[in-house]
Amino acid sequence: MILKIEKIGLSLEVEDELLNKLLEIGKTHYPKEFGGFLIGYYSENNMHLHITDTILPKKYQASKYNFERSTKGIENELVEFYAENLRKIYIGEWHTHPDNSPIPSATDISAINTIINSKKTSIANPVLLIIGCSNTTVDFGFYVWFENKLYKYE
Amino acid sequence: MDKNKHLESVISTHQITKEKTLFDKYVKKKNEVKEALEENYGSDLYYPFNSGSYAKNTAINTKFDFDLVSPFKRNAFGSNGTLKEMYEDVYYFLYEKYKDVAEVKKQKVSIGLEFYADSDGDVIKIDVVPGRELSQDQYREDENLNLYVYYKYGNIDAGSERIKTNVKAQINNIKDRATAEKDSIRKIIRLLKVWKNTKYIYPTKSFFLELITIKAFDSKSITGSIWDKLETVLQYIRDNVTKESFTQKDPGNSSNDLADTLTSTEKQQLSDDMKNMLERIEENDENLKTYFPENTKFKKEDTNNNQYGKNSGMPIPPPKLNFG
Ligand SMILES: [Zn+2]
């Protein structure tokens, strides 16, 4: 699936298989939140992002309204993706909103700010995927932080 | 080129909120230093307060000025204690306390703390300005303080104990006027500070630029677009700063002439710089960008040639992150 933000001209491609996998994983944790790291790579001209994989956290705490993940234990997976020919890297995060719409909360925005302000992270435009799910329905939204604002891919 | 559009962008891209994280670090450090002073000096000290750009609402994000004024009681260093003894005492206290984590430097009227870069590479600088009330309990009345001049400060000699100034009055003067003039003054001050920051070292204190801007608004009718206003202020500085009759009354103490904080050579330089700047911009609008650069970190693109930020090396996710 290819998504785009007309206003700033940036696009994103996500493997359907990956997206379905994330929806499935999200559902198994319902009614608690869950999430993980998004892995991918940018095109040569840096205008297109391809999301290919996820790393699931080994350590996390979750409730219906909160999800805190740690990077403990995922270091090797990060290095392995980076060692691939395409140099896949950490490009953002995903998490679920049980019984809620896939719209970023204030906590989500401050998480984004933590990402862009962390020198070691060195990504300026992190992507946020939110999956809104209930027993019967599922919806999702991809967002990117660009020039101090969050944009939604359509 | 649209000069006004560019200047508005300079102002917005330097806005302090955009460097919120760094700013928060400053506030935290400032509070730490303040608490350390309070703990060490106890009741010899009135409540230390911040007189830096933050309080003055003119801060620009490329560099923060954080001045922490520490008002001492008259007998804090004994009834015969000198201002020099106050200055040295505060210096040694700060030196002992912070020597392992910061550069501790003697400066004109303050003691500079430059903390070594943290894990984000950010360097926090805080200037502690020790001051002492003129007589017992007088600070409570009018908030005037004597400062110690560690080294030559314009036309005021080193070792001098003459500067006395109500720092809070200075802050309020700028605040009140700025509100009344519907932000115009603040915008011009911010632009002048952006210009000053393009220079590595410049003798003119930010505070001097703030006051001269207010003076320009006082003595002339300054209207029109943001460029019109800026141009008028630049012309005012060019034409007036070197005049024999030019004085800058310190709003905190009318017998204190801030024009003395610059030597006549430095005033001439400021005037010449204004003259050059105006001529270069007259020749070519584009030169405005050299004097008043945007903060590229936050520049907005008008076209759709946007790119995802390029990363260097393998990005490491922040260790702990919370989502709601
Ligand atoms: Zn959320």
Image: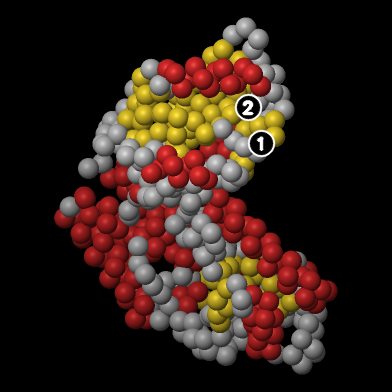
Q: Nearer the viewer, residue B102 or A29?
A: A29
Q: Amino acid at mark 2?
A: Phe
Q: Which residue is painted at 46% across and 75% down in the image?
A: B259
Q: Point out the image quarter for the N terminus of chain B.
A: top left
Do the residues bearing badges 2 and 1 touch, measured as CB atoms within 8 Å?
yes
Residue found farthest to the left: B283
- Could you tell me the amino acid type at mark 1? Tyr
SS for dot 1: strand
B18 up-or-down from B126: above or below: above
Percent across and percent down for residue B13 are: 41, 46
Q: Which residue is mark 1?
A: A60
State the CA–CA distance, disc 2 to disc 1: 9 Å
Which residue shows up at 60% across the image and 21% down it? A26
* Residue at mark 2: chain: A
In the rendered view, would you say B3 is above or below B303? below
Q: Is mark 1 within 8 Å of ligand 1?
A: no
Residue B311 location (% of width, % of height): 38, 46
> Sequence order check: which comes first, mark 2 or mark 1?
2
Q: Is residue B284 left or right of residue A152?
A: left
Image position, residue B112 (x, y; %): 56, 75
Quarter assignment of residue B51: bottom right
Instruction: Give left or right: position of A72 versus B89.
Output: left
Residue B164, quarter of picture: bottom right
The quarter in which the C terminus of chain B is drawn is top right
Residue highlighted by disc 2: A34
In this view, the residue farthest toward the top is A136
Chain under label 1?
A
Residue B283 showing in the rendered view = yes
| Left or right of B119 in this view: A4 | left
